[in-house]
Image (spheres, coloured by chain):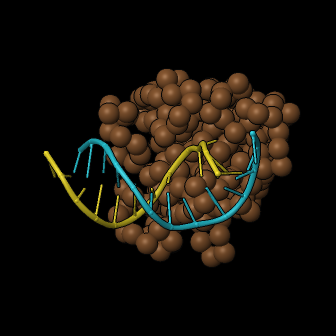
Chain colours: A brown, B cyan, C yellow
DNA sequence: TATGCGATATTCT
DNA sequence: GAATATCGCATAG
């Protein structure tokens, strides 16, 4: 399956500036990663929004050296290390100077399956990029990607949808101790590539 | 299928 | 010193 011609790079003007709108918009879109000798891509099937004023968001206490990428504007990568072992990929939102973003939680793998399998040490298709820490490992995303412009970078960028997007579900977010009741997690209904407890993704 | 726990590093208090 | 937007394995039902 030749997907490369089907995926068109998204321009910044196409991205909703509002965090919640961007989260919904990203479901069904593509993440593309170019590595030496191979290209990886996946379809976004699950995200979480961390808008302005959200106590669970990393920008809540203001800008610091580690979260500065969250303040770049809409369409940049904010990558950080969680629990000492897992990198998390976020797409930033809002105007420059405002700290907010969307956590990418799960991908449906499309291109570069063999490369992902090697990096993830599993050949189970459903487990390759299901979960935020897993997808960064599968896509070889780490701190080097922090701050990249996802609308301009040649190694990591946002692409168009490759097929019609299914119905979008909404739920509480996974693994939080603050703002636990906010319905800020979005996912494609019926996708087997979605993480979290099944009760959250009816 | 569901729940529980340890590993792990960086940041902020 | 505590907390953390997780994962993978273990165990029980």
Picture quarter with the C terminus of chain A: top left
- Percent across and percent down for residue B2 are 27, 42
- The image quadrant of residue A117 is bottom left
Closer to the camera in the image, A160 or A96: A96
Q: Residue at x 53, y 34 (%)?
A: A177
Vertical order, A167 against A28 (above or below): above
Left or right, residue A186 beside residue A160: left
Vertical order, A122 against A64 (above or below): below
- Percent across and percent down for residue A7 are 59, 50
Left or right, residue A176 beside residue A57: left
Closer to the camera in the image, A65 or A130: A65
Q: Residue at x 39, y 58 (%)?
A: A127
- Percent across and percent down for residue A43 are 51, 48
Q: Residue at x 58, y 55 (%)?
A: A83
Left or right, residue A118 beside residue A26: left
Q: Residue at x 47, y 38 (%)?
A: A174
- The image quadrant of residue A61 is top right
Picture quarter with the N terminus of chain A: bottom left
- The image quadrant of residue A84 is bottom right
- Percent across and percent down for residue A162 are 51, 46
């Amino acid at each position: 399956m030749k997907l490369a011609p089907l995926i068109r790079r998204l321009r910044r003007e196409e991205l909703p500036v509002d965090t919640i709108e961007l989260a919904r918009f990203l479901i069904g879109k593509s993440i593309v990663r170019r590595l030496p000798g191979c290209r990886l891509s996946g379809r976004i099937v699950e995200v979480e929004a961390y808008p302005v004023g959200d106590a669970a968001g990393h920008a809540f206490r203001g800008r610091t050296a580690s979260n500065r990428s969250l303040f770049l504007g809409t369409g940049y990568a904010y990558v950080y290390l969680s629990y000492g072992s897992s990198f998390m990929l976020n797409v930033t939102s809002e105007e420059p100077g405002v700290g907010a973003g969307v956590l990418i939680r799960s991908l449906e793998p499309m291109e570069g399956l063999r490369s992902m399998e090697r990096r993830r040490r599993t050949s189970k298709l459903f487990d390759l990029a299901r979960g935020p820490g897993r997808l960064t490992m599968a896509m070889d995303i780490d701190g080097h990607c922090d701050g990249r412009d996802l609308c301009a970078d040649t190694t990591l960028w946002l692409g168009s949808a490759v097929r019609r997007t299914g119905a979008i579900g909404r739920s509480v977010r996974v693994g939080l101790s603050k703002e636990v009741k906010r319905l800020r997690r979005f996912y494609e209904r019926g996708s087997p590539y979605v993480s979290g407890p099944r009760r959250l993704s009816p």
